[in-house]
């Protein structure tokens, strides 16, 4: 039997997971009897895992043009089948993302492997990561910040994805070029490594030279490396927001490590969008999303 650490959810959990406002979900409950939550008192609703599966399927259909009045007339099994049928068309990754959310909450690694093998039949690993894992990681970032999942949930699904990245990295031949060195790192205190790990895979795939430092690297280590190697492109990735003071301090250190060099630093993450607008240092490149750095259909790196 699967050990479910979390098997009850609030309407706020559903709002975060689906993007559908809690107010709208309440209207659907009242008007269409779409869900039947347990009521702890007059104002507090709780939902079970079956409700989560249903609302994810409903949101998939609703967000792609299905009228809620039509959806509400379907049984739970019909909604699931309709979502799956829709998934087999052009929007297949949405269904798989929903399935991975269920996989995460139920700690079902067999389901994760099943989804992975199904996707591998028609997609490259790059396509799987960009179309499925990146949107899932965005969900995880929001869920983490809003305390809607436990660390065990995030670690479970992250480690499964990490294993797939490592597996695919192992298949790539070693680069024999003497090009610029790409140093991949997360600053001290930043532990969400999957996006950076995928960049490691992608850069190796396109033949780039990599030094992969990983998570939570103090800046004094970077300054040491900077003194030992020429022609560096520094690359870092942020999933969780920081305070303005932390961001300012990070940019101050980046400017310091770049001065008197021709090196560049690529900073990925939408938390830096405000800094991107006022950036005057052409050695610093801001990218809002991980997928802005890569190309699915061509083997090339988009900005380096």
Image (spheres, rainbow, N blue to C red):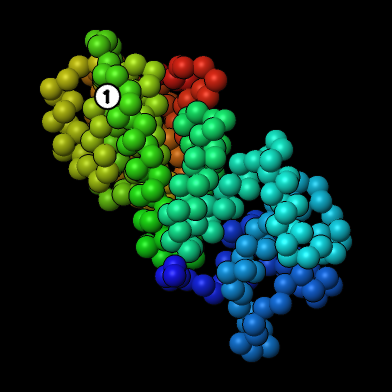
Q: Which sits in the foreground, 253 or 25?
A: 25
Classify residue 69 as left or right of residue 289: right
- For label 1, the crowd category at 10 Å Cα-Cα, with few meaning under 14, some 14 to 19 and many 20 or more, is many
Q: Residue at x 16, y 38 (%)?
A: 220
Q: 137 above or below 145?
A: above
Image location (x, y in percent) of residue 167: 34, 35
Q: 251 above or below 158?
A: above
Residue 35, image quadrant: bottom right
- Element on which disc 1 rests: strand
Image location (x, y in percent) of residue 245: 35, 50
The total of numbered circles placed on residues is: 1
Q: Residue at x 29, y 19 (%)?
A: 173
Residue 253, image quadrant: top left
Q: Residue at x 69, y 40 (%)?
A: 88
Image location (x, y in percent) of residue 276: 48, 33
Classify residue 42 as left or right of residue 295: right
Q: Quadrant of the C terminus?
A: top left
Q: 220 above or below 264?
A: below
Query: Is residue 194 among what the camera can see?
Result: no
Q: 109 above or below 106?
A: above
* Residue most extreme to the bottom: 41
Q: Quadrant of the N terminus?
A: bottom left
Q: Which sits in the foreground, 141 or 234?
A: 141
**Which residue is labeled 1 in the image?**
210
Q: Which sits in the foreground, 92 or 122?
A: 122
Image location (x, y in percent) of residue 224: 13, 31
Classify residue 11 as left or right of residue 241: right
Query: Is residue 227 among what the camera can see?
Result: yes
Q: Residue at x 79, y 74 (%)?
A: 33
């Amino acid at each position: 039997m699967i050990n479910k650490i979390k098997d009850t959810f609030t309407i706020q959990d559903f709002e975060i997971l689906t993007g559908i406002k809690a107010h709208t979900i309440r209207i659907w409950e009242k008007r269409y009897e779409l869900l039947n939550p347990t009521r702890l008192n007059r104002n507090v609703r709780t939902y079970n895992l079956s409700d989560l599966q249903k609302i994810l399927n409903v949101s998939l259909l609703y967000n792609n043009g299905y009228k809620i009045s039509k959806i509400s007339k379907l049984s739970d099994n019909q909604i699931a089948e309709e979502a799956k049928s829709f998934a087999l068309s052009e929007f297949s990754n949405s269904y798989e993302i929903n399935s991975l959310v269920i996989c995460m909450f139920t700690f079902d690694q067999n389901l994760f492997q099943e989804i992975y093998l199904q996707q591998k039949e028609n997609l490259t690993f790059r396509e799987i990561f960009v179309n499925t894992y990146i949107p899932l990681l965005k969900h995880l970032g929001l869920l983490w910040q809003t305390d809607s999942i436990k660390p065990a949930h995030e670690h479970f699904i992250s480690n499964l994805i990490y294993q797939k990245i490592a597996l695919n990295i192992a298949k790539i031949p070693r680069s024999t070029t003497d090009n610029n060195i790409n140093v991949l790192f997360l600053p001290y205190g930043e532990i969400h490594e999957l996006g950076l790990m995928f960049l490691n895979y992608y850069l190796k795939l396109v033949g780039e030279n990599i030094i992969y430092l990983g998570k939570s690297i103090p800046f004094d280590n970077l300054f040491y490396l900077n003194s030992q190697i020429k022609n560096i492109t520094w690359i870092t990735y942020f999933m969780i927001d920081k305070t303005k003071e932390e961001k300012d301090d990070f940019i101050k250190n980046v400017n310091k490590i770049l001065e008197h060099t021709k090196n560049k630093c690529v900073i990925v993450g939408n938390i830096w969008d405000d800094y991107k607008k006022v950036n005057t240092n052409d050695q610093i490149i801001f990218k809002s999303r991980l997928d802005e750095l890569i190309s699915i259909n061509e083997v090339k790196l988009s900005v380096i």
